[in-house]
Image: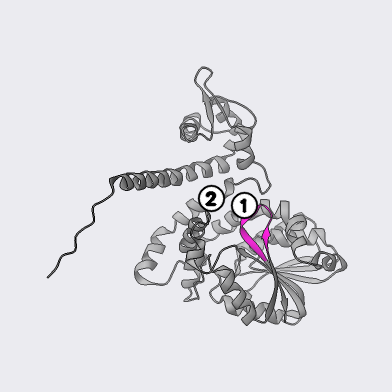
Amino acid sequence: MTTEAVPALDEAKVEEFAGRLFETFTSGTLTLMIDVGHRTGLFDAAAAGPATSTELAERAGLRERYVREWLGALTTAEIFSYEPESGRYTLPPEHAACLTGGGSDNLAPMSLLSALLGNHLDGVIDAFRHGGGVPYEKFRPRFTAVMDELSRGLFDGQLIDGILPLTGDLPERLAAGIRAADVGCGSGHAMNLLAAAYPASTFVGYDIGADAIEQARAEAVEMGLSNVRFEVQDVAQLPTDLPLDVVFAFDAIHDQADPAGVLRSVNAALADGGTFVMFDIKASSHLENNVGNPFAPLLYSISTLHCMTVSLALDGAGLGTCWGEELARQMLDDAGFDVLGVSDVPDDPMDCVYLCRKR
């Protein structure tokens, strides 16, 4: 019997890694503090100018003691600055640009994911041990609201003037009048924006979530739109009675229980030569190619906590968030599409746009 010598630990590396772990844990709790600031309006109130904790609490209509402790966390994290003499806190304008406003520059809604996904951690751990997953229904209705906040700023700022120009002659065709659909439309904001911008075209949004469809319909009414409708629908079984000219899918395919079936369903619903615009995660299908991608740890984590598990809950494919361009191209080809191009998304380094044509 032989025993292998245990290599001596490099204490400097141990200390360095321990420091990294503490930074990770600290970032996790600060993410929740950003969630608090976003949902309570504290960032908007702070952007109005320097304030004491009492003044900031009054601006936001909140309790001063909680605001003061929250400011302690964000000041020591160097998100706020503090003047002891006056007792005033300042949110620098460069920081406010990333934490306030309705456009795609506001990154604060990203913080909402941590609390949402953390609520279902017990179910994910159970799936690690016994298989299956956490069903999509468990995440709703909160999931609908969070995803709406995450995507709304990007759609408002980039959908018409940034993303559509990546789709060849599609803007001209929409202006002339065609039939369009969105699979996995969520709250329907993208379809409502397109319907408002292109009144000659007709639009339909499909989603399995009744709560999401209700929200989409309400917004369409509020916007006074008559050329868009929304239906509760399993997108693996799309209607084919009225062939569509274009189908959109915004970060929806990789979550599906049967993504290959959904792609075939989209293909069947399109008219000959129809266009499929697939907005999805920018990643490689090969882990080694994602090492060094600064967004990869976030993407794989979100996949574990949501995207993969909702698929596996239905005994599905479990593609995961980082299914990647190589596999996406193969699956699109198998479903009967030619990929005409893959483009980066303005103001969104984590996604890309696949422009496809029905073969």
Name the kind of residue labelled 2 in the image. Leu
| Left or right: 27 as drawn, with respect to 188 | left
Residue at image point 47% right, 59% down: 301
Residues at discs 2 and 1 in contact (Cβ within 8 Å): yes
Residue denoted by label 2: 112
Label 1 packing within 10 angstroms: few (<14), some (14-19), many (20+): some
Q: In terms of secondary structure, where does tag 1 sit?
A: helix
Q: Nearer the viewer, residue 213 or 268?
A: 268
Residue at image point 77% right, 65% down: 228
Name the kind of residue labelled 1 in the image. Glu
Q: Residue furthest left?
A: 1
Q: Is residue 164 above or below residue 38?
A: below
| Left or right: 333 as drawn, with respect to 123 | right
Q: Which mark is residue 149?
A: 1
* Relative image position of residue 16 (x, y in whole percent): 36, 45
* Relative image position of residue 234 (x, y in whole percent): 61, 75
Q: In terms of secondary structure, where does tag 2 sit?
A: helix
